[in-house]
Image: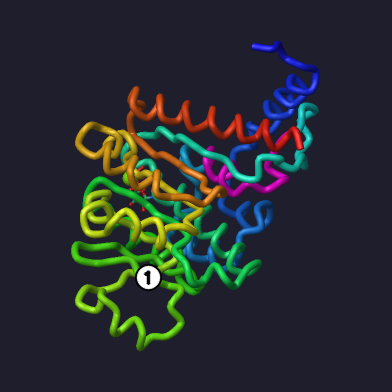
Amino acid sequence: KKGRSKSSSAKADKLKALVFPEPMQEFDHLTSRYGVSRRLANNVAEQGFTVPTEVQLGALPLLLDSPSTYLSESGQPGLTSSIGAIDLLAVAPTGSGKTLAFLLPLLHKLQQEKRDDAAVDRHISALILAPTRELASQTVNEGRKLSKNTGITITQMRKGMRFGLQDHDNAEEEESSEYNHSSLVKADIIVSTPGIVHNTTSESENHLALSKVRHLILDEADVLLDPLFRDQTLEIWNTLSNPKLRVSMWSATMGSNIEALATATIAARRRGLNELGKT
Ligand code: ADP
Ligand code: MG
């Protein structure tokens, strides 16, 4: 309302220049331009995938977030993103390869993070929510293939499971804890329906176990945000307290529910960005 200052419109121009990365036309670019590990790139090749699908060629450069993927106003690559990471809403038809589009950048980020900070090993880093157990299980299968030999673990949370208290170094202590009758779920990436997380663990338990989660992925986001799942999904989202949290939403249809939420998320993040910009 105060009117735009010169610096805020300069910032807007800079943002505009940053948000259109070049599409990734071939998977070879994973290693050559985006610094993806050879292991991870090989796992993609082993699936027999040769060319990225449309949603992949658009989303992968955004999510891999490499400085060289951003074009400057003069069309030259090389501007470093001041955003660091982005929130994304991707809409693409069923069968268009959305699973790989979110798993691959996630695995890449987690590999980098593990390399930079060994302490992340003990915590759940990513949560993928899906509307059905079957879909969650398919995502885990694809995740296992893609993460082969990368050191990143992915597992499905099933009924009766609780989050492992990963900051217990002493296994015996865990053995005698109150959770010893239910299996503990521990991995870098947890895939689950919202109901399992919501109904089998308490809010305080979620707060603790999920406090380091930096990546939240809503698969079939339109369904996760329809009246049946909405409250559970948002409640889980709200327990994720890490300020570095990045959210991506994936859907086959553009519903008003996801659009409103995406807009609100982006607006909140932008306010955060402006705050950062002032210091
Ligand atoms: P969506 O989630 O968009 O409905 P999926 O991620 O389930 O689609 O992918 C549909 C199918 O396409 C899967 O069998 C997957 O293995 C395959 N697939 C994904 N990416 C590619 C690719 N780049 N080339 C060929 N097939 C692919
Ligand atoms: Mg899918």
Looking at the image, residue 149 lies above or below residue 276:
below
Q: Residue at x 56, y 49 (%)?
A: 244
Residue 189 vertical placement versus 278 (above, below): below
Per the picture, the main secondary structure of the magenta-coloured stretch is helix
Q: Quadrant of the C terminus?
A: top right
Please name whichever residue, 66 or 40, is drawn nearer the observer in this view of the structure. Answer: 66
For label 1, the residue is: 186
Q: Quadrant of residue 170?
A: bottom left
Asked whether, in this view, residue 261 is left or right of residue 87, the answer is left
Image quadrant in which you'd find residue 270? top right
- SS of the residue at dot 1? loop
Is 176 placed above or below 251 here?
below
* Residues shaded magenta: 57-71
Left or right of 226 on screen, residue 45: right
Image coords of residue 240 (percent x, y): 43, 50
At x 47% / y 26%, what residue is drawn?
263
The answer as to whether callout 1 falls within 8 Å of ligand 2 is no
Q: Residue at x 56, y 59 (%)?
A: 108
Relative to 151, say whether 196 is above or below.
above
Labels in figure, total: 1
Residue 102, how many percent across, how many down? Answer: 45, 49
- Is residue 89 inside the magenta stretch? no
Residue at 32 percent across and 63 percent down: it is 141
Question: Is residue 68 part of the magenta span, yes or no?
Answer: yes
Amino acid beneath label 1: Lys
Residue 168 placement (x, y as % from top left): 43, 78
Left-right relation of 163 to 13: left
